[in-house]
Image (cartoon, rainbow, N blue to C red):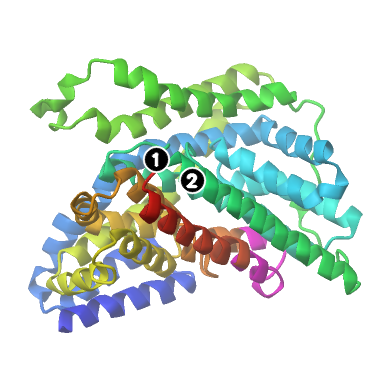
Amino acid sequence: MIGLIGIVLSLILLMYLAYKGFSVIVLAPLLALFAVAWSGLSNELLGFYSQIFMTGLGGYIIKYFPLFLLGAIFGKLMDDSGSARTIAHFFVHKLGHHRAMLSIVLSCAILTYGGVSLFVVGFAVFPIAAALFRELDIPKRLIPGAIVLGALTFTMTALPGTPAIQNAIPMPFFSTDLYAAPGLGIIASIFILITGMWWLNRRVTTAKAQGEGYGQHHEPEQSKPQLDQNDPSLIKAFIPIFVVIISNLLLSKIIFPSMNTAYLATDKFGNTSLSSVIGLWAIVCALVLACIAIIILNWKNITDIRDSIQQGVSSSFLPIFNTASEVGYGSVIASLAGFLILRDFLVGLSPNNPLISEAIVINVLAGITGSASGGLSIALNTMGETYRNLAVEHGISLELMHRVASMASGALDSLPHNGAVITIIALCGLTHKQSYYDMFIVCVVIPLIALIGVITLGTLFGSF
């Protein structure tokens, strides 16, 4: 029981100090060792650090670094080539000003579903949104809600095929791919989009009825639309996104399954199977092909290709080390005796339906860490095998376990201390007080309702 108290205290401190702005890379090992010391194992601190924490951290980087790296490079190339701006402007002009909110949401959704990072999307879309909302006298405080609805909800966790890391992490644990439980994922995505749009449009209507307009704001530099006659055509802008989506589907469903991969079962390759790596192989290859496509199509548009790639490489380091440090923290916590009590309690929350327990555990950990990928990684690295065995025992589809795990990571993660939430609010030149309420509704409340719906449908009808 003493060890369990130490674990709970370390989790509370992790959440509090991360919210205060301390680096997770520093916090994670310190608080993991705090839990070790509290458990009465002070003489084993260095062993826990070098053999458990660093092993967990290193294992995560080995497995997922290509996704973070290629995703960052792809996003930077989409930004520097002007492709992201072209796509955003297309939706604004195609849907018209009377659908301003929908045009911003769909712009973000298409870009993130195509593999562009939230931060690139934010910088590309915000200037357009600010100009459009100012022209139509729509409150500026609603822009963050529109951006996160398109970028941080259904295209991050629910829509089948999304290359987001939150959809990739469950693959090796459940031997699935990015298209796990496609029917349920599509239903959840439609629900989140429609409900989120209803909420945001309702807020616009209410604001107009109360006489509230765009407001007086000191606009940050990014709010000035950066139109460039050298930006690529719409077809050129969309091709890399199509490359990601189509090549990922073909590689994971047709090409790789038809190849002779028996060699994977040998000692040289870790006695693994194609099913455990096919999802990662597919998205890595798809992103490589997409990056090549951008460079070929926009050779003259990108001022310095070498610099764009280097900036993409540099921007990938902090996100993966943040998440990997949280995984190392989880590895240490899972090795403590007190964790067995916590694990049995969490599994016992719904002994006959591990989907419920899985959803609760991942949501809570994502909320504590303020990170969807961090909470998801900790949960599956510590309890992934347990949930896989429970799924088999209760006859639950592993694809359903994957979809629930992915969606569960994208709800409570968006509490006020979430890095993406803070970044988007700052980018828009607003405060939490002004804009977080709508972000909370579209990023936390609505995804939670969708998650409950998927669990209910999956329990009644199985995976589809």
Residue shown at 79% from the left, 46% from the top: 128
Residue shown at 87% from the left, 49% from the top: 98
Residue that badge 1 annotates: 180
Query: Are the residues tagged 1 and 2 within 8 Å (C-beta)?
Result: yes
Whether residue 437 appears in magenta in the rendering, the answer is yes
Q: Which residues are magenta?
A: 424-440
Residue 399 in the image: state x and y as whole percent: 34, 43
Residue 353 in the image: state x and y as whole percent: 29, 61
Residue 138 in the image: state x and y as whole percent: 84, 60
Judging from the image, what secondary structure is the residue with disc 2 in? helix
Left or right of 360? Residue 277 is left
Residue shown at 82% from the left, 70% from the top: 206
Left or right of 424? Residue 283 is left
Residue 263 in the image: above or below residue 179: above
Left or right of 403? Residue 119 is right
Residue that badge 2 annotates: 185
Classified by dominant secondary structure, the portion drawn in magenta counts as helix
